[in-house]
Image (cartoon, rainbow, N blue to C red):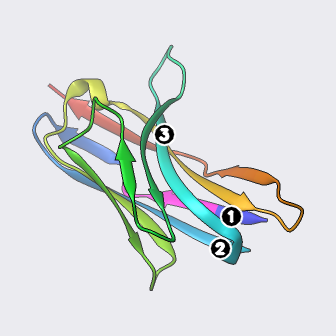
């Protein structure tokens, strides 16, 4: 089992910045990838950014490329999402996700409870 706790959401004006953090606990030694997804009211959950923990490689949704940066903090066992140049359309609940490799070669997906990000125009 892996537990994820997000923090750092809030209200910010358009053009502002926020930093989200996702702290992982439990069987974190089996986590090989972490990412952020978001869900706006009336819309499906969508991918935002991800990082491979072994290589540190990252990928981003086109809508956030160049504005958002995902990074890992090994000392805190956490993954952060730095969000700059925020737009009203970035308003959503942001969820942290962790991918875990099991001993029998399955992949399990864990989710945090979500943190609200609201960008005012």
**Screen quadrant of the C terminus:** top left
Name the spot of residue 62 as percent of width and height, x first: 29, 31
Label ID, residue 27: none
* Residue, disc 1: 3
Going 25% across and 52% down the picture, which residue do you hit? Answer: 18
Density class for disc 2 (Cα within 10 Å; few <14, some 14-19, many ≥20) is: some
Secondary structure of residue under mark 3: strand
Q: Are marks 3 and 1 in contact (CB under 8 Å)?
A: no
Q: Is residue 59 above or below residue 39?
A: below
Q: Is residue 5 above or below residue 91?
A: below
Real-space Cα separation, disc 3 to disc 1, in angstroms: 16 Å
Real-space Cα separation, disc 3 to disc 2, in angstroms: 19 Å
Secondary structure of residue under mark 2: strand
Q: Are marks 2 and 1 in contact (CB under 8 Å)?
A: yes
Q: Is residue 89 left or right of residue 112?
A: left
Magenta residues span: 4-8
Q: Is residue 103 magenta?
A: no
Does the image show residue 93? yes
Of marks 3 and 1, which one's residue comes earlier in the chain?
1
Real-space Cα separation, disc 2 to disc 1, in angstroms: 5 Å
**Can you tell which of label 3 and label 1 is closer to the viewer?**
3
* Residue, disc 3: 37
* Residue, disc 2: 25
Does the image show residue 26? no
Name the spot of residue 35 as percent of width and height, x first: 49, 51
Foreground of the two, 86 or 107: 107
Q: Is residue 57 left or right of residue 25?
A: left
Secondary structure of residue under mark 1: strand
Going 13% across and 33% down the picture, which residue do you hit? Answer: 14
Of marks 2 and 1, which one's residue comes earlier in the chain?
1
**Screen quadrant of the N terminus:** bottom right
Of marks 3 and 2, which one's residue comes earlier in the chain?
2
């Amino acid at each position: 089992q892996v537990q994820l706790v997000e923090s750092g959401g809030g209200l910010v004006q358009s053009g502002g910045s926020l930093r989200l953090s996702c702290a992982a606990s439990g069987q974190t030694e089996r986590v090989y990838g972490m990412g952020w997804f978001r869900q706006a009211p009336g819309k499906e959950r969508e991918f935002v950014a991800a990082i491979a923990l072994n290589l540190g490689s990252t990928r981003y949704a086109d809508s956030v490329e160049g504005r958002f940066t995902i990074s890992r903090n090994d000392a805190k066992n956490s993954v952060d999402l730095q969000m700059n140049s925020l737009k009203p359309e970035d308003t959503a609940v942001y969820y942290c996700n962790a991918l875990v490799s099991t001993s029998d070669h399955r992949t399990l997906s864990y989710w945090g409870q979500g943190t609200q990000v609201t960008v005012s125009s």
